[in-house]
Image (cartoon, coloured by chain):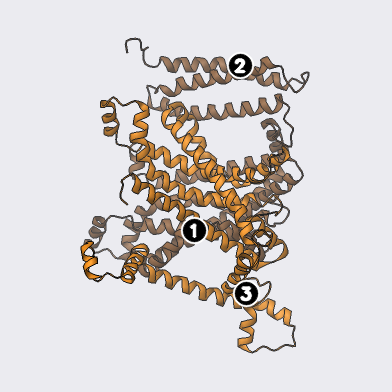
């Protein structure tokens, strides 16, 4: 222990390493994009890349093994390490696809995808409107809300709960996405069929989680409410709904992912000539992978924001919950 | 009988039927009657809905001149060849026809298609859960990895993964990898996540006191892992495997879509939707549902056997 350097030294090492790393990364990017060079780059360049990777791992290891002296510093560090990892993956992706001359039909480089994101904005915007605004959001809202309403009914009628819950659990494990062609057949090619599929997919997770949530309030608290003379609705609003919130948010988060998947896959089965799923399947057919990846990038960012907003809402609404209180 | 039963410590008069009844009650948790009621109501609603939804087709096919009696009309809505909503018995007849009456090797056989999907599912499940476990072990042991990787693993799930399915299949097809593997990779991508998350939780679940105890025994990290962390994580593992096997099936079905409806339950769905063969779609759906139930039940059985073998009690 006597050889241990003072606290923060590793942190300083890591930061110094990063400052050294940044110009090297920029140089490598410039080198790869140099038009004078032909695609299969010399072997020494790849050894440099391997060395960069090793150095990067060392730096991040240093950063991760040390906790920052201040709390906000720690928070920045916790945010920074995954971001650095993401940047590194993007860097390797760019260098390898361009440097090794990977054909575009296999894997386009991030810069090509970025360029497509910029030039095809109108088309991407239309697809976003069709898939996210017309299909995902309404379906997600209707499915989750109806699941919650049925859960309330189940709460009043225990017989229904005992009958419906095992079925709900069972259905949640089924490949519900297979209903997509049926929905397209019933409700046509445009957005209503996708909304219907999303409703079907999101209903059961919402139901099962809401029922579990409504049962989450403790017996003592319920007895207390009864001793206050609170009726069903007062107990529901003041005690049981707040207690159910973590479960409901959990369902909403699960459903946000399911809804995106449902809408996109349903478009594989037939859609008007707009929509993210439609674009992905047709552009794959035309081997225009830049556009496909641009579309996936939009879907990924949308999905992450959707999830992030819900997580933020959860934190604001259930600040009292033990899982947040410690921080 | 009675003496035998009592000598075994059982209640006198516990005949096989009685035992079966009690076992049933235990399995269903006394919920058999409510479940049956809900199922019956659903089936009745299904038949009624079929009358309404198929009425239009019956009318158009029959033309204006034909006058139906009520029972004939209802019977007609329940026996269309391509109804908007086929009724359960039509689906079951179709399933019997395509499962039992056709040779297993035939392309018309649902067994053939289910087998294709099942092999994809199992391969994907194997790759995915092994990856998931290895990732979790690495994450638990390397702090840098946990900090760098964990947020991305979580973010990877907010991305509609299935959107990538066509690319993976087509791209791997371009470089000559075809058949089961590309589809299985999609399944694997879907099912590694719950396994990783649960296993990280499971491997870190032992009480710090127990970890300290292992340290006082001078146990090596290896011993701590195999004697403490791994056994503690097994229940978490099985819970996540049940989820993983179900979504592995979803991944396999979706992965079959872009390959152009060659084989598998997903291809069967796609072909059915091209040609308006609704009964075929529903039969494939029912088969997929049965497959999902079987797979989850198989993992559940493996869990019971393992937990019992480890001396645990459920």
In the picture, measured across the screen, residue A155 lies left or right of residue A257, that is: left
Callout 1 crowding tier (Cα within 10 Å): few <14, some 14–19, many ≥20 = some
Q: In this view, does A11 lie above or below B55?
A: above
Place of residue A262 in the rendered image (x, y in percent of width and height, measured from the top left): 59, 54
Q: In the rendered view of the protein, which quadrant contains the C terminus of chain A?
A: top left
Mark carried by residue A143: none
Distance from disc 2 to disc 3, alpha carbons, whole Å, reads 67 Å
- Mark whose residue sits in front, 1 or 2: 1
Q: In this view, does A327 lie above or below B119?
A: above
Mark carried by residue A23: 2
Q: Chain B is drawn in which colour?
A: orange
Distance from disc 1 to disc 2, alpha carbons, whole Å, reads 55 Å
Question: Which residue is rendered at x = 51% and y = 52% of the image?
Answer: B246
Q: Name the residue under label 3.
A: B53
Furthest residue to the top? A3
Asked whether the residues under the numbered discs 2 and 3 touch, taking CB atoms below 8 Å apart as contact, a structural biologist would say no
Q: Which of B211 and B313 is in front in this view?
A: B313
Distance from disc 1 to disc 3, alpha carbons, whole Å, reads 29 Å
Asked whether the residues under the numbered discs 1 and 2 touch, taking CB atoms below 8 Å apart as contact, a structural biologist would say no
Place of residue A241 in the rendered image (x, y in percent of width and height, measured from the top left): 36, 56
In the picture, measured across the screen, residue A312 lies left or right of residue A40, that is: left
Q: Is mark 2 on a helix, strand or loop?
A: helix
Q: Name the residue under label 1.
A: B293
Q: Colour of chain A?
A: brown
**Chain to which the residue tagged by mark 2 belongs:** A
């Amino acid at each position: 222990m006597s050889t241990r350097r003072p606290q923060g030294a590793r942190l300083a090492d890591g930061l110094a390493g990063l400052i050294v790393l940044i110009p090297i990364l920029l140089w490598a990017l410039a080198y790869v994009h140099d038009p004078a060079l032909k695609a299969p780059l010399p072997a020494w360049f790849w050894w440099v890349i391997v060395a960069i990777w090793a150095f990067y791992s060392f730096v991040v290891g240093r950063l991760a093994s040390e906790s920052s002296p201040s709390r906000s510093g720690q928070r920045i560090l916790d945010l920074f390490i995954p971001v650095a990892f993401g940047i590194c993956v993007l860097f390797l992706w760019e260098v390898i696809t361009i440097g090794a001359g990977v054909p575009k039909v296999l894997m386009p480089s991030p810069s090509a995808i970025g360029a497509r994101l910029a030039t095809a904005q109108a088309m991407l915007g239309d697809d976003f409107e069709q898939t996210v605004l017309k299909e995902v959001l309404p379906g997600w809202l209707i499915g989750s809300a109806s699941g919650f309403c049925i859960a309330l009914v189940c709460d009043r009628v225990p017989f229904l709960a005992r009958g419906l819950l095992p079925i709900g659990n069972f259905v949640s494990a089924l490949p519900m996405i297979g209903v997509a062609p049926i929905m397209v057949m019933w409700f046509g090619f445009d957005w209503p069929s996708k909304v219907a599929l999303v409703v079907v997919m999101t209903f059961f997770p919402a139901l099962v989680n809401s029922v579990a949530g409504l049962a989450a309030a403790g017996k003592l608290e319920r007895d207390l409410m009864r001793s206050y003379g609170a009726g069903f609705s007062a107990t529901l609003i003041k005690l049981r709904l707040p207690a159910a919130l973590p479960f409901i948010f959990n369902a909403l988060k699960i459903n946000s992912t399911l809804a995106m998947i449902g809408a996109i896959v349903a478009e594989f089965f037939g859609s008007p000539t707009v929509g993210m799923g439609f674009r992905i399947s047709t552009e794959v057919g035309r081997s225009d992978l830049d556009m496909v990846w641009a579309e996936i990038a939009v879907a990924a960012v949308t999905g992450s924001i959707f999830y992030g907003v819900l997580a933020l809402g959860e934190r604001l609404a259930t600040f009292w919950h033990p899982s947040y209180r410690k921080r | 009988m009675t003496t035998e039963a009592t000598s075994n410590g059982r209640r006198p008069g516990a005949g096989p039927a009685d035992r079966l009844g009690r076992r049933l009650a235990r399995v269903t948790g006394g919920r058999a009657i409510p479940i049956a009621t809900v199922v019956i109501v659903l089936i009745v609603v299904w038949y009624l809905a079929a009358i309404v939804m198929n009425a239009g087709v019956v009318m158009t096919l029959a033309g204006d001149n034909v006058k139906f009696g009520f029972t004939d009309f209802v019977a007609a809505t329940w026996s269309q060849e391509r109804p908007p909503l086929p009724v359960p018995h039509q689906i079951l007849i179709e399933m019997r026809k395509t499962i039992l009456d056709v040779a297993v090797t035939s392309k018309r056989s649902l067994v053939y298609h289910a087998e294709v999907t099942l092999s994809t599912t199992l391969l994907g499940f194997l790759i995915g859960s092994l990856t998931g476990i290895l990732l979790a072990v690495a994450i638990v042991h390397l702090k840098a990895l946990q900090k760098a990787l964990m947020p991305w693993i979580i973010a990877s799930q907010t991305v509609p993964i299935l959107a990538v399915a066509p690319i993976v299949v087509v791209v791997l097809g371009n470089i000559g990898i075809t058949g089961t593997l590309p589809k299985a990779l999609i399944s694997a991508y879907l099912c590694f996540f719950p396994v990783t998350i649960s296993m990280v939780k499971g491997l870190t679940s032992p009480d710090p006191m127990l970890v300290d105890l292992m340290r006082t025994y001078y146990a090596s990290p290896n011993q701590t892992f195999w004697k403490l962390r791994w056994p503690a994580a097994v229940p978490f593992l099985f819970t996540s495997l049940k989820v993983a096997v179900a979504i592995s099936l979803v991944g396999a079905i979706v992965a079959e879509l872009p390959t152009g409806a060659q084989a598998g339950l997903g291809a069967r769905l796609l072909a059915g939707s091209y040609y308006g063969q609704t009964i075929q779609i529903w039969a494939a759906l029912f088969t997929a549902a049965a497959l999902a139930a079987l797979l989850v039940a198989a993992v559940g059985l493996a869990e019971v056997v393992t937990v019992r073998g480890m001396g645990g009690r459920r």
